[in-house]
Amino acid sequence: MSLLEDCANAYRFTATIHVGKIAEIFNSFSRFLQEEAFFILEHYPEEQLPSRPSGADERPIPVVHYSPYLPTTDLLRLVAPYLERMIHDGFVGFGLANNRRGLELFYSEEKVMTFFTDNHLRLCDFLRQHQVPHRPNLALPADFGHDHLSLLGFPRELLPKALQELSDKDLDSTNFCAELIEQLDMYQVEEGLSFFLTRKEQKQIAELVDKELADNEFSDIEFGSLLLDWSDFVTECENGFEGDLWEYRQGLKIRDTIQSVIEIAPEALAEKIGSIVSDPDKFFQKTLIDRRKRLDPPAEPKLRQERFWYQGMVRNQGIDLRRDLIRQGWFKH
């Protein structure tokens, strides 16, 4: 158990748990999330499945998908047919979360279970009920040399009985993960931005938005999602922005909204939000060229900070953005 960075009262719990308890803990933990939750899936698409021999220097990076918020009971029902396969496959990780309740469970491809919570006493009691004892010094698989095996890498007779009856196609993670993504309407997310807002902080932000920013076009979107949207926008700009000028401006308006919250939030919360967006901000500034020129920002909101995100233009412009910039006269001297 350890405090999360930049959080005075939020914790990370890490546990190695007998495989026979994973499904029970997963389903039992879901009750804390109450009415709704979203599902997390970490996996390797077919083109990224590791093919290098053990010990190779470069290791493929898995992709991560989130589902939208769904009724928790529906989510559990849809995930249930795949649960045992995800538990045993060495190239699949999965989890369950509700940001608004400050809770997340994630079972990684390393087969380590991690919890995030702002109620550590409740989670301590939860783990005690499931007979998971506390160990001050925990050895993790990543601490040692090890290999990962897909379900297809095991002799059939060594698989759990229920999995022995499935076809190779159904045991293939590229197939069953694709099915899950389609059934849950999941979308890929970038893993570059990592943060945790407690329930108290989220409540503070929601109250500030309701009071001060009710007319903002993004006021109905969960603030944590806006932070992720800004990070995703920056990543897209780094790789090559394929949208048009209107879509580009929408990304900048997201940063406007984040800044509006920073400027009305209490000092400690404002500093935390600022630290969350500091890395995406730095990466975005590195993508900008022609910074002596300014893309006119909207008249509102009136912000104290100079909005650097309107200074210059991203280097990697797609066809649509470049076309709109030419029509607007951006390239004229």
Image: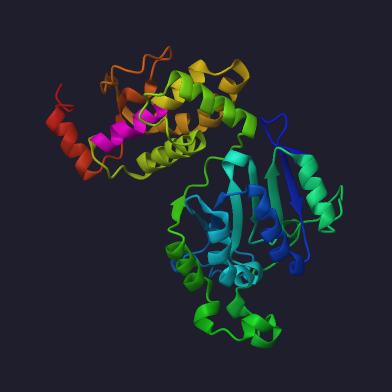
> Residue 59's image quarter?
bottom right
Count of labels in the image: 0
- Image quadrant in which the N terminus is located: top right
Please identify the residue farthest to the top as the structure is shown. Answer: 304
At 57% from the left edge and 31% from the top edge, which residue is drawn? 202
For the residue pair 316 and 4, the one nearer the viewer reads as 4
**Image check: 76 left or right of 248?**
right
**Image check: 185 left or right of 316?**
right
250 within the magenta span: yes
At 85% from the left edge and 49% from the top edge, which residue is drawn? 137
Give coordinates of residue 310: x percent, y percent. Answer: 32, 23
- Would you say residue 59 is visible in this rendering? no
Q: How is the image coloured?
A: rainbow
7 within the magenta span: no
- Would you say residue 211 is visible in this rendering? yes
In the rendered view, would you say 89 is above or below 192? below
- Image quadrant in which the C terminus is located: top left
| Main SS class of the magenta portion in the image | helix
Give coordinates of residue 70: x percent, y percent. Answer: 50, 53
Give coordinates of residue 13: x percent, y percent. Answer: 75, 47
Give coordinates of residue 123: x percent, y percent. Answer: 77, 46
In the rendered view, would you say 87 is above or below 166? above
**Image check: 41 left or right of 3?**
left
For the residue pair 160 and 309, the one nearer the viewer reads as 160
Q: Which residues are magenta?
A: 246-255
For the residue pair 69 and 54, the one nearer the viewer reads as 69
